[in-house]
Image (spheres, grey):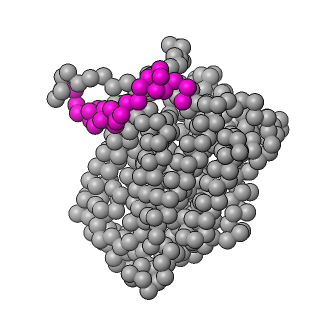
Amino acid sequence: MSFHSQCIILFLCCLALYVFILVRCRSGLLGLTFLNVFQVGSASLSAFGFGLLFNLNDDWIDSEHVTVFWYSGIALISMGTGIWIAWSPLRRSPAEHGVPAGIHFNTTPWVTSEFALLFILVGAFAYAAYPFVQRVPTVNTICANLMAWLRIGILIALLHGKVHRNYKAFLLGLALFAPLSIMQMLLSGHAPASTTLVIPLLIVAFFSMRVTAGSFLLGAVSVIILAFAMSIWMNSRSLLRSGELESLDYMQRAQEVGSEMLNQKKSADLSPQAIQELLFLRIDMSELLAQQVSYQPLGEPYAHGKTFFSGFVSLVPRFIWRDKPMIAGGSDFVSRYTGTVRPEEDRTSVGIPYQFELYANGGPYLVIIGLFVIGWVTAKMELVLFRPFRSLKQILPLIVTTMVICSGGERFSIYIASVGAAAGGAYLLGFFIEFTFPEFHARALGLKKS
């Protein structure tokens, strides 16, 4: 059997494993663990899998790509194994260990409208404040972290709606998110709804309460619709990023972008070839990972954990450690481990998936081991959420930390800083609410009925 054929079998085994996990565990919880799986898998296998599905030309695949597909397939199976082990309580019968099997949201007190509204309102405030603080160092980072709370609030509100048949909080979250995200889009040129919201939202909508054949059918239809919307957006966003609209106010910008999107809708190319090109442009990073396979370890030896150590080093303020070494970031980090040099005028940010830094430190075997650990940790963290909490100081840091870790690949140093800032801010906010609004605190966690 050829190496390429082995990759095809691995890809199909990955799909089968995650379908099996959903069916057997009977829930996708808040969708955060599967968001993590999507981010990792799509970074290295999305273009290959899509080409396989539609029998597209595979001339772009060389030996380095095949190596990427091979270790990515095994690593995703390893990651799924970690999730399977972490979610073992979902597979038990109700009598075992006092843990309800499958769905147990009715026994999770914090699935309340008040708890969802807490996240929605904090996130909405951060969205509204961001245009005024975006150029203020540190403050803009704090505000950006708090903006993610709106996404978490919408997920919790949708789950609350499915459990209690009350969708008021969810509709309020969408009503706030729509205009605020559009304003952010007009300001920054980024998509109004990212995969960090859309993917877990689909998981909660179709897989949180039960898993059926209809769940997968509705999920597939939603993905097709999203591919169409993504195609229109990608062909329209250059108008915002070109700087041509900077002199216009928000309303005028919205009109120009809306007109451009309508024009793109008429000529949108949804052929399999065009969608694969879109995957290469926005989601799939197999080319970058193949460059790394070609370059390491001959061009650059494995770092053997040094990049992880530098993540902790970056947390030490320079006024404390004046001789702190400079930490390569962004493009420099990618260049070091791929041997490619980007033009100086190209200042586009480079986000990297988990597997890039893992490979940089120990090659394909570290990717396989590392993704098993990441899968187990994130799945365990999300499962721990679904137990009673008596303090916002406990649950708020856990939720935001899980969201940060599951939101896609980045350098370890960035994750450490983001988790520290997000969890620290959540703890302080939880302490403030408990002390200042004890009644709301009790209702939000389900300790006291509304």
Q: Say if 85 sits above or below 300 in the image.
A: below
Q: Quadrant of the N terminus?
A: top right
* The image quarter in which residue 119 lies: bottom left
Quadrant of the rendered structure where residue 217 is? bottom right
- Position of the C terminus, as image quadrant, is bottom left
Q: Position of residue 130 (x, y in %)?
A: 43, 39
**Residue under the point 63% across and 33% down:** 65
In the image, residue 300 lies in the stretch drawn in magenta:
yes
Identify whether 215 is placed above or below 353. below
Q: Which residue occupies the foreground of this view, 196 or 443? A: 196
Residue 125 position in % (x across, y down): 42, 48
> Farthest left residue?
320
Residue 51 lies in magenta, yes or no?
no
Relative to 222, does residue 388 appear above or below in the rendering?
A: below
> Which residue is at 67% across, 30% downward?
62
Which residue is most to the bottom?
A: 95
- The residue shown at (44%, 73%) is 89
Find the magenta span and give its range. 293-319
**Whether residue 358 is visible:** yes
Residue shown at the point (59%, 59%) measured from the top left? 18
Q: Is residue 268 left or right of residue 105?
A: right
